[in-house]
Amino acid sequence: MASLPNGLPIVSDRRASPLPALGALVAGAAAVLGLLLAEQQWEVATLAIVGALALLIGGKLGWGEVIHRSATDHHRWITPVAWLTAALVIFGLREHNFELLMLCTVMLYMVAGLGLTVQFGYTGVVNFAAAAFMGVGAYTAAVLLLHTGLPHVLVILAGGLVSAVIGSVLLLPLLRTRGHYAALITIAFGILFRTFLEVNDTLGGPQGLKVPGMEWFGLVFNDAIEIDDETEWSFYLRYAGLCLVLLFFAYHFVRRLERSWLGLSLDAVRLDETAASAFGLNGAAWKIVAFSIGNFLAGMAGAVYAMVTAFIAPASFTFGDSLILVSIVILGGLGNPLGLLPAALIVVVLPEKLQVIQEYRFLLFAALVIAILLVRPGGLIPRRARDYFPGAGGR
Amino acid sequence: MDLALIAQHLVNGAMLGVIYALVAVGFTLFFGVLDVIKFSHGDVVMLGAFTALATSAGLVGSGSALPPAIVLAAMFIAAVGGMAVFGALMAKFLVLPLRKAPTLNVLLITLMAGTVIREAVRLFYPQGSNPKPFPRLLPTGAWEIGEFTLRYDSTILLVTGVVAIVLVHLVITRTRLGLAIRAVAQDPETASAMGIPFHGTVLATFAIGSALAALAGVVNGLYYSEVSFNMGLLLGAIGFSAAVIGGLGNVYGAILGGFIFAALQTIGAVLLPIASAYKDVFAFAAVILLMAWKPGGLLAERSADRV
């Protein structure tokens, strides 16, 4: 973009064309579908190379800026279209069990990632136990589903609530420490939680628990969907819809939070707690808010995860899984909810898809993340400054 | 509980303490000079143990009947030297390039480097995915003092670890290199202005820390007679906990932290009425409480914040 001598960009009065945003949307949907449906290794490899090239060339040519302007100028209808596209992608996968399950995992990791975004993207409260908080939600859901008749929608909420409450145990040490010291507290909690589950027999021990499926007003989620004699849709279709709804609410909640004065306060606390308190912001209070919101989201994601996978075990909520969640958030671009999608796809789906080189996939995946961090330290889609008047074109 | 049993637990605890302290010192040294946490440190411990294992396998496999002492010496030299070089290389190519990036990025990149190391060992070491027996090269006898038996090998390992810790202490306090490390830790810019080579000092620090990690790995292997590719993750987390309990940046704090963590685990295993399986739960819960009580670690580095 050209700029004036004083460095300010020249902003045109005209609204940007919606085409770049729509193009990005179509390309994104195609990439998701392609990645999920690719069966040959060369297909996955081609997709990965095309994606990397698009990132490199697009970065040089400033595509990100063009797409961003186009999307914000038309955000009123681009956003619903984007969600509609997501629903269509899910519907397009209606006969593919495994792919839908992976997509569910991606969406739930994104919900937990949104929680982490609030925690350390906005407020700077580190959390290296996100998987443990998902685990709290999952085990809460499992116990409630097995032993009570609570409506299942409430079970999901309960998973989030219990997770937030258990997280509050860590608040006192967390508020007194900062930086790496705070990181240690969450790491210790993550390891503690996993070890606790493994040795605790009432919660199934290392073997884990079987979780009944979701029911909603008589609709049994685990029943197969038979359309006619020949076609049968995967029962994961309903779960994918549920995950999408959860993701929808979580995403817009976090976005609204960021835009509101609450988000502004959270950012202020992260950037300089002392300065923020000089302006009358209570740093401790905002950290409590952010930590609880984040754990609530992670807990809900965990509760749905338990229902989707129908089986939970301590091995699903290890310190390593927490680190995977942290990598998703940093890889996507810390503080940018939109970056979670490509990051979660890379982290969750890519290793699954590189099955032929199965043995080497974690090695390659880790090397890939190192490469991305060295080339793009801000993550795939770095966070932008707030745009309070989207569509105003900067006027 | 009789005295002999208590002594037995003391020796076990001290052994663990030495291993943890060796790992924790690395964490605290890296944090001192660069303000970073290198999360692949636990995997460097593991890699050190495997380097030693490969060396012994190579020496024994070559058919020559070498005395155990020489094999052992070769193992130690290969592991410690190899990891020193490896640590310096990691600092040069992964940590230093990210000096200006947010600390979380450094954390993530070293974490991923740890995964690369772990996976590489699992894949490329012959049958690396199974736990490997570590050769028992130390004398096997034991002193019997009443009910209490003190094995020769644990005594040797204990002494080795303590000597290593004392050596680090001497290097840090008595040598020019130690002076440079302390200067860079205090203020890198002023240190550079005084003619201390920043990069060289950082690389040397990483070499020392990684050499200690290798030593911890070999000691760990000789003590338990078994190593596996994924032993690094928990050891790394424990070493990090120990360094933080003591106060990051403080070498004595790290040593203290290592022994405290070992003590917590031992106490958890011995005294908890339920089951010793809860010993890690107990130890990590105690760490959380300890942090709530002393947020900056027991030997806190600084008392005031710069605003």
Image: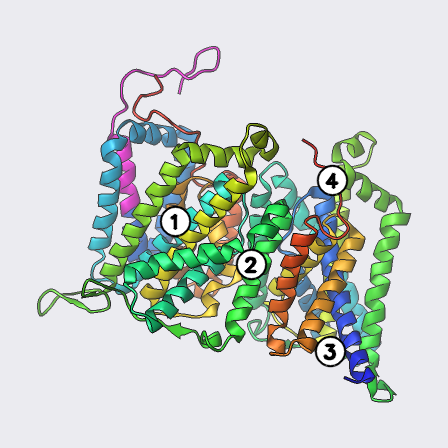
Among all residues in the image, which is located at the extreme right? B174
On-image quarter of the N terminus of chain B:
bottom right
Is residue A11 at least partly visible in the picture?
yes
Q: Residues within 10 Å of mark 2 (few under 14, many from 20)?
A: many
- When the figure is inspected, residue B255 is found, relative to residue A58, above or below; the finding is below
For discs 1 and 2, the disc positioned in front in the rendered view: 2
Q: Which mark is residue A48?
A: 1
The residue wearing badge 2 is B115
> Which quadrant is the C terminus of chain B positioned in?
top right
Rendered view: B194 above or below B28: above
Label 2: element kind: helix
Asked whether, in this view, residue B243 is left or right of residue A362, the answer is right
Residue located 68% across and 62% down the image? B45
Q: Residue at x 46, y 41 (%)?
A: A333
Disc nearest the viewer among 3 and 1: 1
Q: Is residue A140 left or right of residue A245?
A: right
Q: Which of pointers 4 and 3 lies earlier in the amino acid sequence?
A: 3
Q: Nearer the viewer, residue A203 or A329?
A: A203
Please state which amino acid type lies under the numbered disc 3: Val
Q: Which residue is mark 3?
A: B60
Residues rendered magenta in the picture: A1-29
Q: Is residue A163 magenta?
A: no
